[in-house]
Image (cartoon, rainbow, N blue to C red):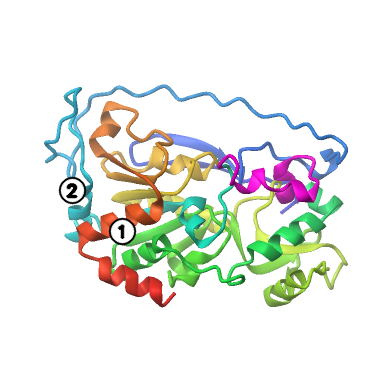
Amino acid sequence: MSSDATTTETLESTNGNSISSVSQPLNDHPVKKDDDFDASNDEDEEEEEEDDENNDDDSVVSAPLAHLTLMNEEGIERMKLEEIAELVKTKSCNKIIVLSGAGVSVSAGIPDFRTPGTGLYDNLQKYDLPFPEAVFDLGFYRYNPQPFVSLARELWPGTSGIKPTLSHSFIRLLEEKDVLLRNYTQNIDGLEVLAGVSPEKMVECHGHFRSAGCVDCKAPYDGELCKRKILEGTLPLCTKCGGLVKPDIVFFGESLPSRFGRMIQSDLREADMLIVMGTSLKVAPVSLIPEIVDDDAPRLLLNRDLVGDFCQTRENMRRDVWEEGDCDVSVKKFCDLLGWTEELHKINKHS
């Protein structure tokens, strides 16, 4: 895989919609090729995004949504959080995809990327970067790896007392209840695995810190040795070609892990519910998952903000629930309805 390669796939849902996806990990900043990087140029161009037109199709929604009776002021049937909980509790929905973002880790002390003032991209001035996203840019890493090495020391999973949150423990609890199909996480902190979620239930869309490799010859590098060197503030170098080594997290200019491409099609066909937690849904192709999950699948958004196409069309209003607020607070409320609160706290205490 060349360093500037991108993964192009067609994600197709059971409703016939298909989306051609090009990996743009960690942010919607345009990917820079190594030979295009100019460290003296502080300007970056942002691509204009066109909003999809709302689909006002008033077609009939089949089970498990057809029983709903709650009406809003527009006369549209609306689902309630209690009904989502009942579907999970009774295992009427037992193949749940969880799509999680940086918001699930904020209470662990890990900043999200985009919140003005507190987000990671707003607090990188000490690294004197040409643009904030450069810290995860492959071309810039080759030019100046020190900013990433310094940042990685602060963010490395399992250090500085960072522990899984209630939201991470909730994902593990879904697995223990045998209703979790897959967790697609956009995070690189590895807290889901630390919380006890099985690796086979995980798709870490933007990679992780547990393994490492050379950015030039692609030779694998011992993950523990990479960790030790970076925590010491030392640059890990490839023992085969002398090139720079980094953890296997996705930088701009790199493809998403192959596991994403292997799992997404079959998972979308199987999923009977989608839970989205703590994300701005601004990073393709992961952000497209809510749009192409089966039309009959209820969708629960546990988020500070209304994002994506949630509650944006008449059809989606029938199957969507947005629980506004911090992820951990919303997770606790949901678990209260499920009768899982004691188990949630027990898992979190021992994570």
Identify the residue at image location x=40%, y=36%: 306
- Tell me the distance, in whole angstroms, between the alpha carbons under discs 2 and 1: 16 Å
Quarter of the picture containing the N terminus is bottom right
**Measured along the vertical axis of the image, is residue 308 above or below residue 273?**
above
Query: What range is drawn magenta here?
Result: 115-137
Identify the residue at image location x=19%, y=49%: 82
Write down the residue under mark 2.
83
Can residue 271 be seen? Answer: yes
Q: Amino acid at mark 1?
A: Lys
- Magenta segment: does it hold 134? yes
In this rendering, the count of numbered labels is 2
Residue 53 location (% of width, % of height): 42, 22
Compare residues 45 and 161 and report the one nearer the observer: 161
- Magenta segment: does it hold 93? no
Residue 139 location (% of width, % of height): 80, 47
Q: Residues within 10 Å of mark 2 (few under 14, many from 20)?
A: some
Can residue 101 be seen? Answer: no
What secondary structure is marked by label 2? helix
Numbered label attached to residue 332: 1
State left or right for residue 15 relative to residue 125: left
**Measured along the vertical axis of the image, is residue 147 above or below residue 153?**
above
Compare residues 172 and 270 and report the one nearer the observer: 172
Rendering quarter of residue 195: bottom left
Q: Amino acid at mark 2?
A: Glu
